[in-house]
Structures are given as C-alpha cells and as structure tokens.
Amino acid sequence: MFFYSLPLFFAQTQFGSPFELFLITLTLFIGLFISSPPYADGYLTTPPAIKSLYDYLLYTWYGQLSLSQVFWPFFLLLNLGIFSADYSAKEGWISISSWDDAHFMFFIPSFFWAIAVWRSSENTQTRTGAAYARLITIAVFFEYALKLLIRYQYPRIFFNCQESLIDYVSCF
C-alpha cells in the first residue's frame, strides 16, 4: 500500500505535507483506539471448526474468528494484488484500462474485508491491535482515493505513456 501513490501524492500535489498526514493519521488512530471494543472474555476457548473456504468466509463475515485470522490473509492478498497491478502498469505490461479493472477487482472485496475486520475487532487481546487493524482498513480506502486522483489527474506521470501506443488516449 502507498508504494507508488504516496510519493506521487506528495511530489505532485499541494494537498498536504507528510507531517500533516502524520497528524491526521495519529488523530484517527487515537479516535479508533478510544472507540475500539474491549477484549471479549472467553472468546477463543472454542474456536469454530473451519472445514472449507465457505466456512472461513462465513465466520469471517459474522466476526467469529480472531482478528489476526481475518486481517492478515486479506491484507497480504490485497497488497500483493495492488502492487502487481501498479508495477505492471508502470512497466507498460498492462494497459491503463486493465489497471482500472485490476483495482476495481480488489476494491469490491475491500468492503467485505473492512466490515469483517470491524466485526472481529473485539476478538483480539489488545485494543491497540484492533485500532491498528481498523486504521489500515480506512487507509485502504484512502489508497483507492489516491489511485483515482492519479488515474484522472496525473496519468502521464504514473503510467508509461510513451511506450503504450495502444492505450495512449487514456493518458490524456
């Protein structure tokens, strides 16, 4: 997350500085820490039996798994997918339209992931972990807002428009 978009955001726009973003993030984290639920006593004494992917998604949706079981698989897959799409677009391996499609494919499951993380936030032993997980889910949507800004305001800077003759019109 933010591997390509945040440096471009600070270098090409005047929306804010890194210090201002840090203050906003810190304020948001404090608010999420205060509002995070306390640890549910006796929750992990009998974890549900996961026999299939359907069971995993069902227990994830209902918030019946631990926060780490919900947060890390989706986080790693999402970051791998976003980084792969960005790297492929910067190298000119995929078109700008394909880059849009790849990000849209990861955007829709992000809602499922965000809701599941918020529902599973009470299934961790520290309120700090719950606040960090919630902060990262909010940051994912900020990342998508940056991607949208890059796509429509700065496509010639981000994409390799000199070598993509097929999709050259998308750079303007």
Image (tube, grey):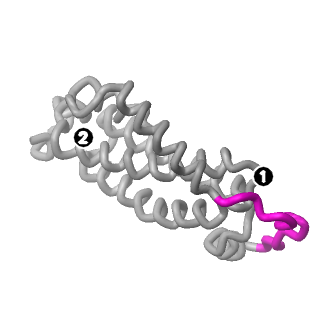
Point 79% across, 73% down: residue: 51
Q: Is residue 82 above or below residue 7?
A: below
Q: Is residue 27 above or below residue 61?
A: above
Q: Is residue 76 above or below residue 112?
A: above
- Highlighted range, magenta: 37-51
Q: Is any part of residue 47 visible from this angle?
A: yes
Judging by the rendered image, the residue that carries numbered circle 1 is: 125
**Nearer to the camera, 99 or 76:** 76
The x and y percentages for residue 154 are: 18, 36
Quadrant location of residue 161?
top left
| Residue 49 painted magenta | yes
Numbered marks: total: 2
Graded by Cα atoms within 10 Å as few (under 14), some (14 to 19) or many (20 or more), the crowding at tag 1 reads some
**Magenta stretch: dominant secondary structure:** loop
Point 66% across, 45% down: residue: 128
Graded by Cα atoms within 10 Å as few (under 14), some (14 to 19) or many (20 or more), the crowding at tag 2 reads some
154 displayed left or right of 143: left
The x and y percentages for residue 30 are: 54, 43
Q: Earlier in the sequence, mark 2 or mark 1?
A: 1
Residue 150 is marked as 2
